[in-house]
Amino acid sequence: MRRKLAAGNWKMNGTRAALAEIAAMAEAAKGGAEVLICPPATLLAEAAQNEAGVAIGGQDCHAKPSGAHTGDLAADMLHDAGARYVILGHSERRQDHDEHNEDVRDKTRAAWDAGLTAIVCVGESLAERDAQNTLDIIGGQLAGSIPDGATGHSLVVAYEPIWAIGTGKVPTLDQIGDVHDFIRARLERRFGAGVGRSVRLLYGGSVKPSNAAEIFAVSNVDGALVGGASLKAADFVPIIQALN
Ligand code: PEP
């Protein structure tokens, strides 16, 4: 049985005043679904200390455990600050930082070595969808970004169509279902049925209170990775409740 997961990606948003939003989400986190917030790194330690009921995660990590990498964070540093998850391969990292599947795979290994659960993001551009290449792209990202040895505990996969992130556009429920079923089949084929069925699959891209319940009813959708609507408890709590 896969535990539902409501994950919030705060991106480059939030100062210490925003920690009150996490506190306000904690009550909803007492339902069945797991609640995760990935705040900016500056807030990680305090968020992890304050709110035992809300899991805390990073938004990226370096592939190396330490060294001369100015501005970067090692997976072990995130873990030491209280993180239990890390988002890897988000399309904004792939675009803004020229990250490729191999980089994401190396970072995922580093995350596992540090005891973090990696949320590996995959997703097609609009041009790729229009050219009917969606499943090829997703298949390539899964094969290239996820190292061998995944387990249901160490890996979560987030399907995030690039064209749906922050745009208000959402794929049809059939399109979401097709991709999630495809990801599930690929994971089962590569890692075996037991592991493949235990990895949680999140949908991400313009999830909001008004569309969360219908998206969560799609087969193989085990929760959501939410950007904008995770910043405020008033938006995120109804999304959590749609999973509970
Ligand atoms: C995201 O960035 O992971 C995301 C899904 O953003 P939004 O919910 O704002 O579309």
Image: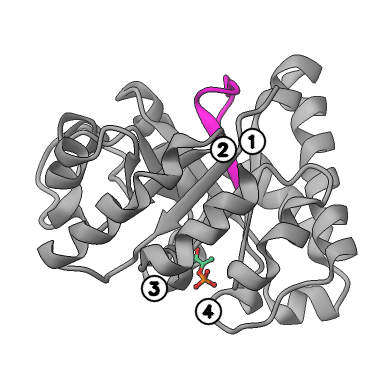
**Inter-mark Cα distance, 1 to 2:** 5 Å
Residue labelled 4 has its Cβ within 8 Å of some atom of ligand 1: yes
**Mark whose residue sits in front, 4 or 3:** 4
**Mark whose residue sits in front, 3 or 1:** 1
**Inter-mark Cα distance, 1 to 4:** 23 Å
> Earlier along the polypeptide chain: callout 4 or callout 3?
3
Residue carrying label 1 = 200
Q: Residue at x 57, y 19 (%)?
A: 149
Disc 1 and disc 4 in contact, CB within 8 angstroms:
no
Q: Is residue 10 left or right of residue 151?
A: left
Residue carrying label 4 = 166
> Does residue 16 appear in this view?
yes
Disc 1 and disc 2 in contact, CB within 8 angstroms:
yes
Residue carrying label 2 = 156
> Does residue 105 appear in this view?
no
**Inter-mark Cα distance, 4 to 2:** 21 Å
Query: Is the residue marked by circle 4 packed among few (<14), some (14-19), or many (20+) residues within 10 Å?
Result: some
Residue labelled 2 has its Cβ within 8 Å of some atom of ligand 1: no
Q: Is residue 212 left or right of residue 32?
A: right
- In the displayed structure, 214 sits above or below 76; it is below
- In the displayed structure, 168 sits above or below 18; it is below
Residue carrying label 3 = 96
Stretch of the chain drawn in magenta: 147-158
**Inter-mark Cα distance, 3 to 1:** 27 Å
Which element carries disc 2, helix, strand or loop?
strand
Q: Position of residue 201 (x, y in %)?
A: 66, 42
Q: Is residue 14 left or right of residue 190?
A: left
